[in-house]
Image (tube, rainbow, N blue to C red):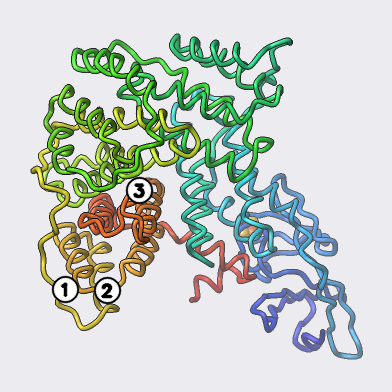
């Protein structure tokens, strides 16, 4: 390609050329010879035309990375090579041969991502992901690397936040499917950042020598779970996998997690749900290490001495378990039932009443999904109405919501009895949150409120997004409800609200709730009343999300690293970014 003339690149000078696709190329005239390289420094995109050349070595002006001007090799440790192009001078014209070959830096960029994950460097992670996506590397492969890293990080550290990190990764992956381009990159970069951290090699877990029957693994795992011996559980699970019993692993872990002594440890159920999704998305080979290690930690966790209320609740639940074990909740099919009466009992601050009401609903044949819908919408309704002037209780309210929704995963990957027992864990969470000052409201009643006073749907969306961005938590809930009352699209509003939340610096924190609201909103938009179709409280999913996101927002834009990384992947230099 003809790019310039000799007259335009004087001896000792450099010149930047902009290609049609926006890519910037640097031409150098050094000791009578013309060189052509990518103009963006592989480190952070600074224009190399501003660099210095000595002995055939080009040194970037910003952080001093240096490169072989001819071959592009980088002399610094942990630095990508610079792309160079063959040059031909025909009479006075400078021609360069552009690399038309397909994307060839996949391994280099995967290594860069690996480095970013280890060093917890946000820019490196964002840059690597932007380059990989630009090169057409499937996001599953990027997530696989993040997942492998998380597995090693959790297994080799004392990080007690393993399931929180996993939840961010899994939820970001799922949310990312709903977005495209920069939004998608933003979510993936957020996901990868949230699993970054040190990771060391550890001794390989080896299976127990045979013969070992599944019945023994099952019995031992339950015993070790009761005794809080997570290391022994891990070895049992690893053995199960080696013997081909992997499909029995998650149901067994679920059975352990819903045991009465785990009342008050709802995070285990949440964590198992995410592990189940990881297995579903990436298969056992890619996720085994994580499932065995984190799964063992979740069901082998220490529980501490229970206080009086929890002790009573554990023994009450223990006395109820045989009834659930002998029942067949999968046969339950009732959808219309006295939901408000159940809610009065759940919020009565009386565990006995609460648990008995759940037992009665199960005995009356109410479908498990219908009961889960009640718990999900109750949590959403509480988020939509919790007073925000003192402590809104977002931490526990979002646990109520996510825990309730995770029972659907328990139903899918555990079994019916697991999900039925999970209802008691969700009921306990409501009891534990009895300090929240949210007035009781019959969930089955229509919501009040008029229509939103705006010209059209677009103005309504803008008004709400503006309220979120300007932290108007007192208005935003009412506005969302009025928007929906006006018959405007909830799907569109959710999508737009999600985008605003993803680009805020609280995005990591909000991922699990955003994912739950997405799932539950779409689940309830069908015709199945058991899933919440036509339920009057359904709108509270969006109202609660908007209030939560607005109240925890800190009004800082964290998207700049990702934005810059996108521009970098497009071949723009940092100076271009600054200039624009
Ligand atoms: S060394 Fe070139 S941008 Fe950092």
Q: Residue furthest left?
A: 439
- Mark 3 to mark 2 CA distance (whole Å): 23 Å
State the quadrant of the N terminus.
bottom right
Which residue carries the number 3 mark? Answer: 513
User: Would you call the spot at circle 3 few (<14 residues within 10 Å), some (14-19), or many (20 or more)?
Assistant: many
Which of the two residues, 441 or 481, is positioned nearer the viewer here?
Answer: 441
**Height in image: 59 above or below 23?**
above
Mark 2 element type: loop
Q: Is residue 446 above or below residue 87?
A: above
Which numbered tag is attached to residue 488? 2
Number of dots carrying numbers: 3
Q: Rounded to the nearest whole Å, what is the CA distance between mark 2 and mark 1?
A: 10 Å
Q: Is residue 529 left or right of residue 337?
A: right
Label ID, residue 66: none
**Viewer-nearest residue: 35 or 547:** 547
Image depth: mark 3 or mark 2 in front: 2
**Residue that appears at 33% across and 41% down:** 367
Q: Which element type, helix, strand or loop, lies under badge 1?
A: loop
Spot occupied by residue 361 in the image (x, y as percentages of width and height): 24, 34
The residue shown at (43%, 11%) is 226
* Label 2 Cα crowd, 10 Å radius (few <14 / some 14-19 / many 20+): some
Mark 1 and mark 3 in contact (Cβ < 8 Å)? no
- Percent x, y of residue 563: 50, 64
Q: Residues within 10 Å of mark 1 (few under 14, many from 20)?
A: many
- Write down the residue under mark 1: 452
């Amino acid at each position: 390609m003809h790019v310039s003339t000799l007259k335009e690149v004087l001896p000792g000078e450099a010149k930047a050329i902009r290609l049609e696709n926006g890519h910037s190329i640097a031409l150098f005239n050094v000791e009578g010879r013309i060189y052509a390289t990518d103009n963006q420094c592989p480190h952070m995109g600074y224009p190399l035309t501003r660099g210095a050349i000595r002995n055939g070595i080009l040194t970037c002006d910003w952080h001093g990375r240096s490169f072989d001007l001819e071959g592009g090799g980088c002399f610094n440790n942990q630095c990508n090579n610079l792309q160079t192009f063959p040059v031909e001078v025909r009479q006075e014209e400078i021609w360069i041969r552009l690399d038309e070959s397909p994307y060839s830096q996949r391994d280099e960029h995967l290594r860069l991502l690996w480095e970013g994950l280890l060093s917890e460097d946000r820019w490196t992670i964002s840059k690597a992901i932007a380059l990989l996506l630009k090169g057409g590397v499937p996001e599953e492969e990027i997530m696989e690397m993040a997942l492998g890293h998380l597995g090693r990080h959790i297994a080799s550290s004392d990080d007690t936040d393993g399931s929180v990190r996993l939840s961010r990764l899994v939820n970001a992956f799922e949310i990312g499917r709903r977005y495209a381009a920069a939004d998608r990159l933003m979510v993936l970069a957020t996901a990868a950042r949230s699993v970054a951290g040190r990771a060391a090699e550890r001794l390989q877990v080896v299976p127990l020598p045979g013969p070992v029957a599944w019945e023994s693994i099952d019995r031992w795992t339950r015993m070790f779970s009761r005794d809080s011996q997570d290391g022994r559980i891990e070895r049992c699970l690893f053995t199960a996998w080696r013997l081909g019993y992997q499909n029995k692993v998650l149901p067994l872990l679920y059975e352990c997690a819903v045991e009465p002594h785990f009342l008050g440890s709802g995070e285990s159920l949440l964590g198992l749900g995410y592990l189940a999704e990881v297995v579903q998305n990436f298969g056992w080979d890619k996720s085994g290490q994580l499932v065995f290690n984190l799964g063992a930690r979740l069901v082998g966790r220490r529980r501490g001495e229970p206080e009086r209320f929890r002790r009573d609740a554990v023994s009450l639940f223990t006395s109820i378990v045989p009834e659930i074990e002998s029942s067949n909740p999968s046969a339950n099919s009732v959808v219309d039932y006295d939901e408000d009466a159940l809610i009065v009992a759940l919020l009565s601050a009386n565990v006995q009443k609460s648990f008995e009401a759940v037992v009665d609903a199960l005995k009356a044949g109410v479908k498990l999904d219908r009961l889960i819908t009640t718990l999900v919408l109750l949590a959403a309704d509480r988020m939509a109405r919790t007073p925000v002037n003192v402590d809104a209780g977002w931490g526990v309210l979002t646990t109520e919501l996510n825990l309730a929704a995770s029972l659907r995963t328990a139903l899918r990957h555990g079994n019916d009895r697991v999900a039925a027992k999970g209802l008691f864990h969700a009921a306990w969470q409501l009891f534990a949150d009895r300090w929240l000052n949210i007035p009781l409201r019959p969930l089955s009643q229509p919501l009040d409120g008029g229509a939103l006073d705006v010209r059209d749907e677009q103005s309504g969306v803008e008004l709400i997004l503006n309220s979120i961005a300007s932290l108007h938590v007192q208005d935003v809930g009412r506005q969302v409800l009025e928007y929906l009352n006006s018959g405007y699209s909830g799907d569109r509003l959710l999508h737009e609200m999600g985008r605003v939340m993803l680009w805020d610096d609280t995005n990591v924190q909000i991922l699990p709730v955003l994912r739950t609201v997405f799932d539950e909103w779409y689940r309830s938009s069908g015709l199945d009343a058991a899933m919440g179709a036509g339920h009057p409280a359904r709108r509270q999913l969006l109202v609660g999300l908007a209030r939560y996101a607005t109240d925890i927002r800190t009004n800082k834009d964290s998207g700049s690293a990702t934005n810059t990384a996108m521009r970098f992947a497009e071949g723009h230099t940092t100076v271009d970014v600054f200039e624009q």
